[in-house]
């Protein structure tokens, strides 16, 4: 039903626009390493979201909802990875400040950003558990399950990728407004701080 699909697409857009750990990481990559790296992180988040939604619809979300230990382990794996990446980004900015040379602060590579956000998308248990309650509302019990699930996964992934890309481009443009080495170093630190905050937000999630 097109009306059901449009309702799901609209709900997906609202979810994509709400700031969370994924958006914070994308903005962090944009501020510290530029648009190319940020867009690579958007692609990684799309892959992670698709994997998380697939796991949810396959029943892993129900397992996480039932097991406090599984939820906590997955949560801290994702949070720890984000915080470490943020600390590394800030450390690079600090080395650049000591040397008074912006070029010593090497940007994060697009490949690293891509795989980082794949990890964030998969290791964010709140997302998986949420999909268990959210997605089935849009699945008709009289229709074939797998085609409907595939449509929902593709729709959510595509819509959220668009909103994430908008955040990436806007943040990269804001960072590009200040080209002086000192300003670039502070943007690098701000990006690392955003990554750490997104890790803290992930760690703070509860069922």
Image (tube, helix red, strand yellow):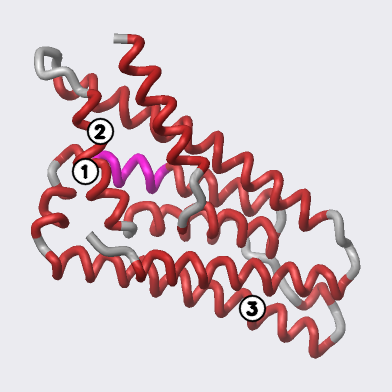
Q: Which residue is mark 1?
A: 56
Does the magenta-highlighted stretch encompass residue 55?
A: yes
Disc 3 versus disc 2: nearer the observer: 2
Count the numbered circles shown.
3
Note whether 41 is above or below 204 in the view shown. above
Marks 3 and 2, the one that precedes in the sequence: 3
Report x, y in % for residue 48: 38, 48
For residue 148, side relative to residue 153 (left or right):
left
Q: Report the residue at 80% width, 90% height from top.
A: 98
Disc 1 versus disc 2: nearer the observer: 2
Q: Which residue is mark 2?
A: 135
For residue 98, side relative to residue 147 (left or right):
right
User: What separation in Å lies between label 3 and label 2 (alpha carbons)?
Assistant: 38 Å
Near mark 1 (Cα within 10 A), the count class, few <14, some 14-19 or many ≥20, is many
Q: Report the residue at 84% width, 70% height from top.
A: 183
Note whether 122 is above or below 94 in the view shown. above
Report x, y in % for residue 4: 31, 16
User: What separation in Å lies between label 1 and label 2 (alpha carbons)?
Assistant: 9 Å
User: What separation in Å lies between label 1 and label 3 (alpha carbons)?
Assistant: 34 Å
Q: Nearer the viewer, residue 74 or 99?
A: 74
Marks 1 and 2, the one that precedes in the sequence: 1
Q: Report the residue at 76% width, 73% height from top.
A: 186
Q: Nearer the viewer, residue 138 or 109?
A: 138
Q: Are marks 1 and 2 in contact (CB under 8 Å)?
A: yes
Give residue 90's mark.
3
Read off the magenta span.
47-56
Q: Nearer the viewer, residue 97 or 107?
A: 97
């Amino acid at each position: 039903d097109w009306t059901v699909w449009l309702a799901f697409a609209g709900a997906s857009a609202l979810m994509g626009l709400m700031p969370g750990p994924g958006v914070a990481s994308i903005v962090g990559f944009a501020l510290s390493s530029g648009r190319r790296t940020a867009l690579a992180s958007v692609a990684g988040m799309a892959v992670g979201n698709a994997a998380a939604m697939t796991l949810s619809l396959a029943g892993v979300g129900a397992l996480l909802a039932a097991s406090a230990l599984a939820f906590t382990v997955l949560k801290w794996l994702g949070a720890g990875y984000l915080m470490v990446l943020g600390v590394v980004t800030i450390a690079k900015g600090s080395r650049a400040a000591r040397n008074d040379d912006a070029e010593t602060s090497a940007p994060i590579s697009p490949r690293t950003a891509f795989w980082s956000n794949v990890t964030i998308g998969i290791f964010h248990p709140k997302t998986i558990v949420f999909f268990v309650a959210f997605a089935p509302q849009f699945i008709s019990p009289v229709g074939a399950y797998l085609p409907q699930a595939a449509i929902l996964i593709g729709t959510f992934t595509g819509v959220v990728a668009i909103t994430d890309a908008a955040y990436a481009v806007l943040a990269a443009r804001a960072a590009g407004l200040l080209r002086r080495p000192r300003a670039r170093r502070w943007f690098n630190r701000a990006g690392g701080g955003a990554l750490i905050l997104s890790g803290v937000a992930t760690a703070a999630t509860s069922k």
